[in-house]
Image (tube, helix red, strand yellow):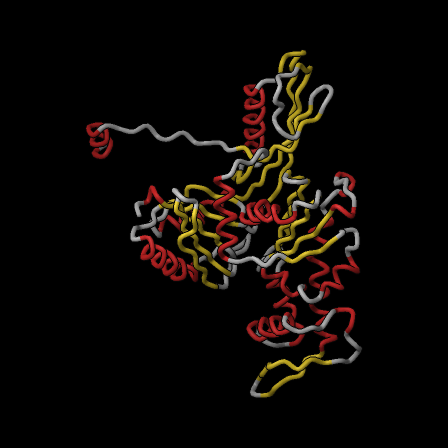
Amino acid sequence: MSEEDFKTYIDFGASKIRIGIFDKNFSRLVFFSEKKWLSTFNSKHLNLDESKKILHDLILSAEKKIGNYIKNINLMFDPQDLDSIDLSIKSNLENKKINIKEIKLLLQESRHLILKYYFDKKIMHTIVEKYVTDEKEFYTIPKDEIKSNFLILETKFLCYSKKTFDYINNYFKENHINIKHFFCSSYAKSLEYNKYFENYEIFFFLDIGYEKSCISIFDKKRLIHFYSTPLGGNHITKDISKVLKISEKESEDLKQSFNRTETVFSDVSEGGSVSFDLIKNQVQKKISSDILNKIIYARLDEIFNLSLKRIDFSTVIFDKKNSILVLTGDGSKILNKNSIYLEDRFNFFNEISFFEESTESICYAGFNFLNNANLYEVSFMTKEPKKRGFFEKLFHLFR
């Protein structure tokens, strides 16, 4: 299989790295795999040294499968410093017809303003939220050329720091791999999983990861809010470790054991205990389930409050019976058998659902994101460098 025949997607998470190889001719996943790792990746300190061998092993396995070298990849990645920036820009038309050229100019100007005033940022996604004219609002490009005195373009930019971009880009270059596309993993996944909940008009998607959580809100397939919070499942593990004075490895094992119990937050009696296979200094300890619940509850409460408090619910007009909150990500698994907590706290959703992800589903999310048309996403293609002739190359080489 030549490189022209396949596309490679890597989901670079803070606790897992996943790889998927697609046959371009048949849009078929021919290889996928994942490996766990524990990152020290945050906004202040970027260190991916521990992942080098894991990434090397994954790529080597994929190359053996397809019988060729992997030189180019599409990277799914949720930067710790991911930010959502909204911009509204207006053009006076003096009762002229709105055309695609005018829209393109406004988009370019919007992008220019973001890069000018947020000069330390890179734009990951450009999402048009709304087109406003004299008499009407449009959520997609108006099909008919209509006359208007003005055009307002409301756009959402998902951005991250140039520092993060340079670090990740150089990291893959050191491994002789070129990144063709950077895109936000949580955003791509929420678009993909949206299709499983088409009976609902308003779709809240909360992806609780290892070190951060992302919330996306859709009106049908139109993104209306996107925010990230620097808290995830690993913060629960650290809280358990600190309060119970046990190692983080033991805390993670304890949290995973708790995931598999039938205990619910509201049913724990005072002073009750749950016996886990937790051994410290050769002595088995009994952990109070009441204390464990309180530790987990406190941090989950913070994750949910921080994820939801930035949302202006006055701008999200929805009927409870047509709304759903979908939880995914490894950090959400702790709530799978403890949904009473959610139902008590967030009763303005008609349904709260858990979506069990797999390496395969995540890879397809990336593939479909780049290959399926999105009415709201805008792509700015960089121009290919002009090809030089042999003598021109020779001249530049010696110069």
Please indicate, yes or no, whether residue 88 appears anywhere in the rendered image: no
How many discs appear?
0
Image coords of residue 80 (percent x, y) = 56, 51
Which residue corresponds to the image point at 69% horizontal and 21% vertical from the top-left? 133
Residue 290 in picture, x, y percent from top left: 74, 75
Q: Residue furthest bottom?
A: 283
Up-down relation of residue 286 to residue 212 (above or below): below
Q: Quadrant of residue 114?
A: top right
Front residue of 326 and 381: 326
Residue 123 appears in the figure: yes
Query: Residue 64, relative to residue 204: is it above or below?
Result: below
Q: Residue at x 55, y 73 (%)?
A: 249
Q: Nearer the viewer, residue 309 or 223?
A: 223
Which of the image's four quarters has the C terminus?
A: top left
User: Is residue 79 positioned above or below 96 on the image?
Assistant: below
- In the depicted structure, whether residue 260 falls above or below residue 381: below
Q: Position of residue 285 (x, y in %)?
A: 64, 84
Q: Position of residue 52 (x, y in %)?
A: 39, 59
Report which quarter residue 273 is drawn in. Answer: bottom right
Q: Residue at x 58, y 71 (%)?
A: 252
